[in-house]
Amino acid sequence: MSSPLLSIQNLSVQFRVDTGWVTAIDDVSLDLAAGECVGLVGESGSGKSVTALSILRLHERTTTRISSGLILYQGQDLLRAPGSAMRRIRGSEIAMIFQDPMSSLNPVLTIADQMSETLRQHQGLAGAAARKRVVELLGLVRIPDAARRADDYPHHLSGGMRQRVMIAMAIACKPRLLIADEPTTALDVTIQAQIMELLRDLRRELSMSVMLISHDLGVIAEFAQRVIVMYAGRVVEGAPVAQLFRRPVHPYTMGLIAAVPKLDSEASRLATIPGRIPGPQEVIRGCRFSPRCTLARDCCLAEQPSMQLVSDHQSARCPPRILALSEGHG
Amino acid sequence: MTDVGLGSLAAAEIAAPRRHGTLRRLLRHRSFMIGFSIILLLTLAAVLAPLISPIDPSAMKVRLRFRPPSSAFWFGTDMFGRDVFTRVLYGARISLFVGFSVCVVSGLCSAIIGVIAAQFRRLDGAIMRLMDALMSFPAILLALGIAAALGPRVSSVVIALTVAYIPAGVRIVRAAALTVREMDYVQAAQVSGASSLRIVIRHILPNCFSSLLVHLTFIFAYAMLAEAALSFIGVGIQPPIASWGNIIAEGRDYATEAWWVMLFPGIAISLAALSLNLLGDALGDMLDPRQKGGA
Amino acid sequence: MPACCSFGTCGSNSAWRQDGWPVPDTRLQEVTLIRIVAKKLLQAVPVILIISILAFLLLSLLPGDPALIIAGEQASPAAVEQVRRQLGLDRSFFEQLAVWLFNLAQGNFGSSLILNQSVLSAVLERLPVTLSLAGLSISITIPVGVLLGSVAAYFRRTWIDSLVMTVALFGVSIPAFWIAILGVILFSVQLGWVPSSGFVPISQGVGPWFSSIILPALILSLFQIGFLARMTRSAMLDVLSQDYIRTARAKGLSEWRTIGKHGLRNALIMIITATGILLSAAIGGSVIIEQVFALPGIGRMVVQAILARDYPLVQGTMLILGFTFVMINLTVDILYTLADPRVSHD
């Protein structure tokens, strides 16, 4: 197997709170191959956004710090790369789009202005050439009347169109990896489908890898090839998408999948996972999911479980379950 | 296989840190504590002035003029032999009184006018034009004019400064009230049939309170500085009543021979204004938290 | 609402919107600049009217008989009567008001009792002094204040932030007149670098003019720099925490371009409104500073007029200043509208 495009190894990030520093994500590892689409799924507070922001070192410097780990991109450790190297990579090799397109675009600058910044920075385009490319890109993301839209301000556009602009800005320099942090969460359902379809088409046309972050299992299921599940700052399971849904190993994953309402089921109540996700400050001995886990045992409460391989491509952080599966139960 | 699911949730809770109450947060906030302590000290000194220094601040003893600071006269004596320390102490009374009164009266007026402007659209236009007119003068100039017209006494200074600072407060209250009005809970109250007055008192006013409070703290400081300036020019408090401003004015001509007359009141004003600004900053920090911990 | 919005001169009279802007699905109808200017001008008219009436009322605030006060206690009844007739105080209230407004419309702001000239000419004579002082002070204040505030915001929670904010805090807390006196003692008396009082007009040389005005201007700027630095820091903190700053970084833009272009451009809105307040504070502050440095400016004239009971002069000057600030606020308001493409007018 050739080396992955991106490899996050044992990444730990801390937040600053009144009393000191607390761990936000702990020992997160994941690999992403060239051309692959990986989905990172988890509830709010699971640490998925923190992980994504760390790749490009976009976290808030005064309140967040990376305490340990490596992020290898084409062999270079991004966490220790100089600022100039990062600036070269951001926007041209690795691009990112965010959840709220309304606040992610500068309200006092025109669309064309903001888009040509990337072009100027990485491709040296200016003036007429830049504008031509801007209109081209807007057409690529299927914005009607692109030439006129280019001179609009963000608040003239609807939510869906703003997100298309964000995508256009991100793919302007044909990045090898696109990180999409909850790109459809702030949008209406019908617009969501359009945006996801656009991403799928662009991915194919530009041969781009995508890291899709979402709390919505449906979106992940449709789009991703491989899924990483995060809970309370740790990776708890990773598997190819079909395998994950067919045979989830970690109890949290099982709970997540069960919680998705099915139109054809006869159940009268929605399935939920009791309890709530622990905050970064809460210290829990043992497995962080154990307080909510219906299958928890004494060993789960005693010590932190480690990630173990379930099969060739699937791994999970739940030794009791893996054991049970290998012995033929569950 | 034991089911320990929900039970250990409680155990997890115990490990979580307790929520800090507002009071505790205040006490741990350094700016707040420093600012609050200084202004408290000054207020106590002002209130207890006769006890701290039983000398009459206007008592002139020509033989004792221009004594430098010593154990007998902590801040020395001025050109008339008056004890500077006592005068500064009594000056504190004036300054703090003026600052506080301006603060309270302008605050009340601003709150009332601001809410009326926000509630009654028809009056809004007229009220805001009037406020704009008042704000067209620099506050000092307005206060100067009014104080000059009313005569050089404490009440004139208070009235003048109050009028000068009301428009700013009205803008703040009005802006806050307009924002609150659009909030869902106000609309919910309206729908459930609450009377307008009730809505104003129970919902709108409390939410304007925090912005206004921070603003008023700074007004206290500005009012004190303004009073000192007015008294310095000769339009505010006149000697022999001691005001920090007029002590400096009197001491100015003897700046090289008796520097202590001018120095200490200036330090006093700076200290008082400093502490109030610190207080205002601290309150602003806490009432408008901007911490984005991120997740 | 940001706490820095003290003195809430947020351009238009609408509430300060932190994150909610109108989001239509279709294009906003473009409002032409001329329409905006016309509307603001129209709003300014009643303000000017009110100011005129207020200035008029200033005289009637005087306790007792204005004519007597102006003529002096020792004056004979005949002299008092003459003053009364001279000032038109023997007419009814509304007649006086009408005469007052009529005169104003013709550009007659009254005449000084003591200076023997019209208020307008007295003000114009002293304008260069006050303009030099306020102008120089503002041109120092704006770059220094914005720079300090931005630096403090960028390095928030570090020692740089604390240092800058402490300096700013002292700036707004120390009384200007006091530090002015200390400044004179140090720089004029002890060091002899600058004259301790008096104004040298530019016609007599830029060097001497600068010498005579630099110390007063610096002292005047102290408070304003402190104020502007604090406001800028607050505005920049707000802006720097916005998502579009993160987007700019994600595009690979350098820190300079991110902060400079995206950051300041947004904070500009706040800075423009702050400038309006600063101009007002500069003129107000110059009243005090001119006294300390014996500069023959408008501020000093007002103070001396008050002490000498030259009330028509006070009245007229206040009025002229009031009109000037209405114009300034109008300009600031329009600039604010130009700077922020989101603003729609209610």
Image (cartoon, rainbow, N blue to C red):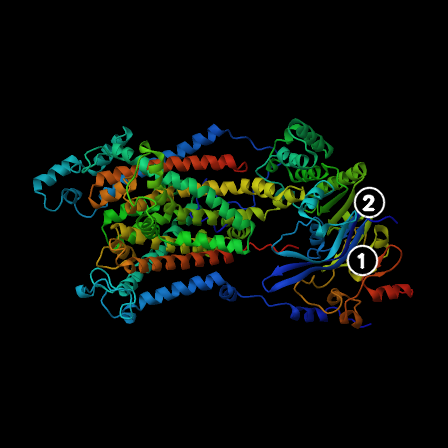
* The quadrant where residue A312 appears: bottom right
Picture residue at 44% right of the left edge, 54% below the top: C169
Three-letter code, disc 1: Glu
Vertical side of B224 occupied by C36: above or below: above
Residue C159: % across, % down: 53, 56
Q: Name the residue under label 1.
A: A237
Local packing at callout 2 (Cα closer than 10 Å; few below 14, some 14-19, many 20+) is some
Answer above or below: position of B152 versus A325: above
Which chain's residue wears label 2? Answer: A
Q: Where is residue C269 in the image (x, y as percent from the top left)?
A: 50, 41
Q: Nearer the viewer, residue C39 or B198?
A: C39
Q: Name the residue under label 2.
A: A34
Instruction: Tell me the quarter of the image containing the C terminus of chain A.
Output: bottom right
Q: Residue at x 15, y 35 (%)?
A: C86
Which residue is depicted at the point 41% across and 57% down? B274
User: Nearest the camera: C346 or A238?
Assistant: A238
Left or right of C57? Residue C140 is: right
Mark 2: which amino acid? Ala
For the point 62% across and 46% down, which residue is it?
Answer: C243
Q: Is residue B205 visible?
A: no
Q: Is residue A52 above or below residue A125?
A: below
Residue C129 in the figure: left or right of residue A206: left
Looking at the image, residue C205 sits to the left or right of residue A278; the answer is left
Determine the secondary structure under disc 1: strand
Which residue occupies the extreme right position in the image?
A: A328
Q: Is mark 2 on a helix, strand or loop?
A: loop
